[in-house]
Amino acid sequence: MGEQIEFNSEGTVTSAKGYLAGGTFAGLKTPGEGVLDLGILVSESPASVAGTYSTNKILSPSVTVTKEKAAGATARGVVANSGCANCAVGPQGFSDAKDLSALAAGHAEVDEDSMLVSSTGMIGVELPMALIRKAIPNVELTSEGGEAFARSIMTTDSRAKHASVSFQVDAATYTIGGAAKGVGMIHPNMATMLCFLTTDADVEAGFLQNALSAAVDLSFNMIDVDGDQSTNDTVLLFSNGAAGGAQITADSESAGVFQEALNQIAIHHAKELVRDGEGAERIFAVTVERAASSADARAGAREIASSNLVKAMVHGKDPNWGRLMMALGKSGIELNEPNIDIFVNDIHIVHEGIAIPYYADAVIAGMNVAEVQFRIALNIGTGVATAWGCDLTEDYVTFNSAYST
């Protein structure tokens, strides 16, 4: 059974067979060259669907409506808008989310209950439904429309984010395509972020949900831009079986390679969100290893990745390892200070909890890269996890001090 996974940075949500997508400009965002703000993704045949969503107690009605519709584990597609979060607008938000879903379903010629809805943008602003009604017919749904769909969900993103992975099982080749957005308000527990994934494999609904939840835990739940969690986070995964072949279940021999392919594309998109973080100049990876448990490793890595002092340290290329130690200590995980080793880009700078001689200029120079690597060995167990963050720059503060004006 062949299991090689091939990554395609040019892939999109329509790289998987049997999906159509497109985007248009409806007027939700400021006009500009190439600006789109309304997109539709649809499967040409009924699909299983899995989802993970924001745990913020203030939720956009677009999220609530999608959760209710996706509870049956089947869907045909999703309509997504940028420029307006459809959140904190009272009962009108639910009415508008349902109307937007119905309009998109009619345009795509699918059942209204099978069309999900996502929104992203400014909180406290109602969806301009008159503009949307006028624009929906302009969304051209094609098998080449994945890039336009990815652009339509951007808010403060500097570039569209899309990719695909393919893998072979016996004689069948399967593809997972994806599009994601979000560069601010990113600190997910499952941030403001959206991700839509498609596969032409036939994946059993229960395993599809479990696989997505596992992939999200390794990817979107392990990134941080600014420590804030959005009201609109949504990750959806559609499976339509258009590539043929046997159904993939949790017990299938192919379950492992499907999970690995899904993990790979989810981690790619998660890192791209961080890489494009508002004002960011570089990203950093934090690996906590030999922790007492996997849960401790995850908590420790996330605490460091979300520390503003660590982010500022990365921005200044300052090898101030005390900030790593501080963030680790406040995570609440099991620690033994005399056991801790710290590495910056594989340069060993702390051993058994104490600084060891190192050439500071070499570490500073090593931090002047696109992706800085921190590795912290706790040396008390076997737990390991990696989280990703971006540096905190003056541009982030400047941008967000005038976001609504």
Image (cartoon, grey):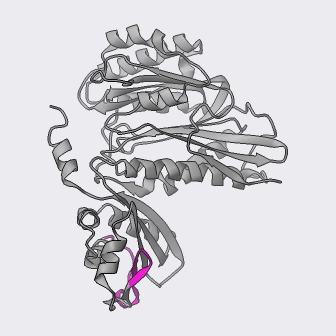
Identity of the residue drawn at 55% across and 33% down: 71
**Image: 271 above or below 107:** below
Where is residue 335, by image quadrant?
Answer: bottom left
Residue 105 part of the magenta segment: no
**In front here: 182 or 316?**
316
Residue at figure coordinates x 53%, y 15% from the top left: 140
Residue 171 in view (yes/no): yes
Query: Could you say where residue 139 lies in the image, as x and y percent from the top left?
Result: 49, 15
Answer with left or right where residue 237 lies relative to residue 222.
right
Q: Which residues are magenta?
A: 331-348
Does residue 347 show up magenta in the picture? yes
Q: Is residue 10 left or right of residue 23?
A: right
Question: Residue 112's x, y, as percent?
Answer: 54, 16
Q: Nearer the viewer, residue 113 or 288?
A: 288
Q: Position of residue 213 (x, y in %)?
A: 54, 49
Residue at 38 percent of width and 33 percent of height? 154
Q: Please, is residue 208 above or below residue 296 in the view?
A: above
Percent across and percent down for residue 301 are: 40, 67
State the image quarter where residue 391 is shown.
Answer: bottom left
Above or below, comparing residue 170 to residue 342 in the picture: above
Residue 75 or residue 36, whichever sits in front: 36
Quadrant of the rendering where the C terminus is positioned:
top left
